[in-house]
Image (tube, helix red, strand yellow):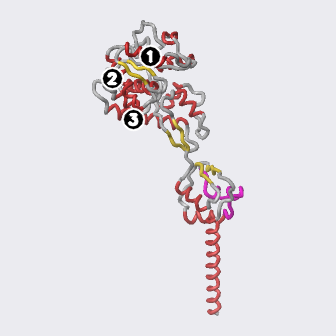
Amino acid sequence: MLRKIGYGLLALCLLTALMLGVALWLQQQALEQELHLSEAQLLDVAPGSTPGQQFLELERNGLIEGAFWLRLYWRLHHAETSLYAGEYALTPGMRMQDLLERWLDREVVQYHLTLVEGWSFRQLRANLEASPKLAQSLEGLTDEQVMAQLGYPDLHPEGRFFPDTYQYTKGVTDLDILKRAFARLERILQEEWAKRAKNLPYDTPYQALIMASIIEKETGVPEERDQIAGVFVRRLEKGMLLQTDPTVIYGLGEHYTGQLNRTHLRTPTPYNTYTQAGLPPTPIAMPGRAAIQAALHPAAGTSLYFVAKGDGSHVFSDTLEQHNLAVRQYQLNRRADYRSSPAPRPAESEPSE
């Protein structure tokens, strides 16, 4: 009898071991299987989803087999690990094991949003609205309401956000991006302000930011930024009007249709630096770090004038006579849409074109 019992226990152990071996083999087969994909697609894991739910959904959609064994595997090896919400990239030839590793590494799909140097806040908002993977939370809000959402209801938004490329995942809000860009600008401005040159005509970092925005709009040639800054700083120090087109254009807003004329240069707005002394009241665009550095480290020199050559670069002059010669050289017979930086001059004089 004892011998029969012993044989029975042995058989039971062997059967258990066999069943366990089969289960392990089926789990391994489920892990090693390739996803049934003919083209790349995204797996959107909603907040609160569990791996078991995802395995069943994948099986229902015909992408995998053996969801039961995959659920068992997860419970045995990763029971304490929650599933990170987001989008996961699925590609042909990908194994189930590869997807599990992405889940464990929280390797969700990243998107990129680029805020361009020289953009206005209006352009920035349009770019946010055109990003379909961003959760839109600011639609219909005024600029003032947007700033209130950021916690700064009394701040003008222009120039307050740092132009750069920002990564984000699906579900991140437009407000989240603005918070990051705002904090980045604040940090960089304070860093650069701490290293500023001496004896600059700015009382606050914000005034330097205003100047940087003008520099950003005046030239796209990197090596000219500090020269442009030098001209404007010397003009401020001498009490001369800045007389720069980009500020006038900004002040015209929707009334600007692509060409400045003499009437525009006489139109009184707080941003018309042909009629208003000093800096405009706010930035006119988003300046990059290089423009901020130029505003805080203007090139030494004696030039007080510059004129666009038509290729993005400028000719710098010390005297109005030299400047007028450059104007005639580079602006005569120009295209109808050509525009240079007009010659700085007393506010009451006739503006040149």
Mark 2 vs mark 1: in front: 1
Q: Residue at x 45, y 22 (%)?
A: 308
Up the image or down, 12 lies above or below 228; here it is below
* Residue 154 showing in the rendered view: no
Left or right, 52 with reference to 317: right
Q: Residue at x 59, y 33 (%)?
A: 129
Q: Is residue 64 magenta?
A: yes
Give the residue number, with chain letter if any, for mark 3: 188
Give the residue number, with chain letter if any, for mark 1: 327
The x, y position of residue 263, in whole percent, is: 52, 9
Left or right, 60 with reference to 311: right
Q: Which amino acid type is marked by label 1?
A: Val
The x, y position of residue 215, in whole percent, is: 42, 25
Name the one closer to the observer, 39 or 129: 39
Residue 8 picture quarter: bottom right
Name the one closer to the observer, 287 or 143: 287
Q: Is residue 224 magenta?
A: no
The x, y position of residue 118, in whole percent, is: 48, 29
Up the image or down, 142 lies above or below 37; here it is above
Name the one closer to the observer, 24 or 52: 24
Instruction: Characterize the local packing of mark 2: few (<14), some (14-19) or many (20 or more) Cα atoms within 10 angstroms.
Output: few
Separation of marks 2 and 1 at Cα, in angstroms: 34 Å
